[in-house]
Image: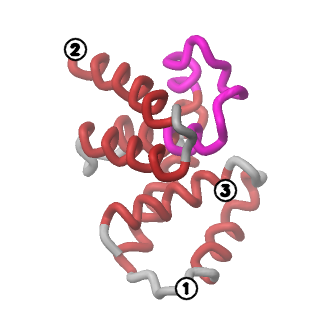
């Protein structure tokens, strides 16, 4: 599994968080890895968990950023797929030192193309582009 596939798996976990109670996260992680058809290597699992757990840990801050950047859209109106993609990307941008800004944005847009609606890539890119221009200042 390459880094893109590992990130996709982290996205799946972050997406599932939107449907479960916070105290169910440990069980959700266990089930997620038990149900994988192919074995997940130790370093891949560590990356997936670091991304998903980091997103969960900073969820309040991340959601505040999403709310500020999506001025025309209340967070509740944004699709669960787009929210999960944005949460993961914003975690990578603000809280992960190992993921470059351009990689976080590009990977988020690719996830939006694969799992979102026709409008998702543009929406995700717009929100993250706004964050990127803010971070360059």
Q: Which residues are magenta?
A: 64-86
Q: Residues within 10 Å of mark 2 (few under 14, many from 20)?
A: few
Taking the image as shown, residue 80 lies to the left or right of residue 12, namely right
Instruction: Tell me the element at label 1.
Output: loop
2 vs 3, front mark: 3
Relative height, residue 33 to residue 107 (above, below): below
Q: CA distance from mark 1 to mark 2?
A: 45 Å
Task: Evaluate if marks 2 and 3 touch, with contact meaning CB atoms under 8 Å apart.
Answer: no
Indicate which disc residue 78 carries: none
Indicate which disc residue 137 carries: 2
Q: Residue 136: x, y in percent?
A: 21, 20
The residue beneath circle 1 is: 37
Q: Please report the residue visible at 52 percent of the width from the left and 37 percent of the height from the top.
A: 118
Q: Please report the residue visible at 62 percent of the width from the left and 83 percent of the height from the top.
A: 34
Q: Residues within 10 Å of mark 3 (few under 14, many from 20)?
A: some
Instruction: Tell me the element at label 3.
Output: helix
Magenta highlight on residue 98: no
Relative height, residue 71 to residue 116 (above, below): above
Instruction: Tell me the element at label 2.
Output: loop
Taking the image as shown, residue 23 lies to the left or right of residue 129, namely right
Q: Please report the residue visible at 26 percent of the width from the left and 37 percent of the height from the top.
A: 101
């Amino acid at each position: 599994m390459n880094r893109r596939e590992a990130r996709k798996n982290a996205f799946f976990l972050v997406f599932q968080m939107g449907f479960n109670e916070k105290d169910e996260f440990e069980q959700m992680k266990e089930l997620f890895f038990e149900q994988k058809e192919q074995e997940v290597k130790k370093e891949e699992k560590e990356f997936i968990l670091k991304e998903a757990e980091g997103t969960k840990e900073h969820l309040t801050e991340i959601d505040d950023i999403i709310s500020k950047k999506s001025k025309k859209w209340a967070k509740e109106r944004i699709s669960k797929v787009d929210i999960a993609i944005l949460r993961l990307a914003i975690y990578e941008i603000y809280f992960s030192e190992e993921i470059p800004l351009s990689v976080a944005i590009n990977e988020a847009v690719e996830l939006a193309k694969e799992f979102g609606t026709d409008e998702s890539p543009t929406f995700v890119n717009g929100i993250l582009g706004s964050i990127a221009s803010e971070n360059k200042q």
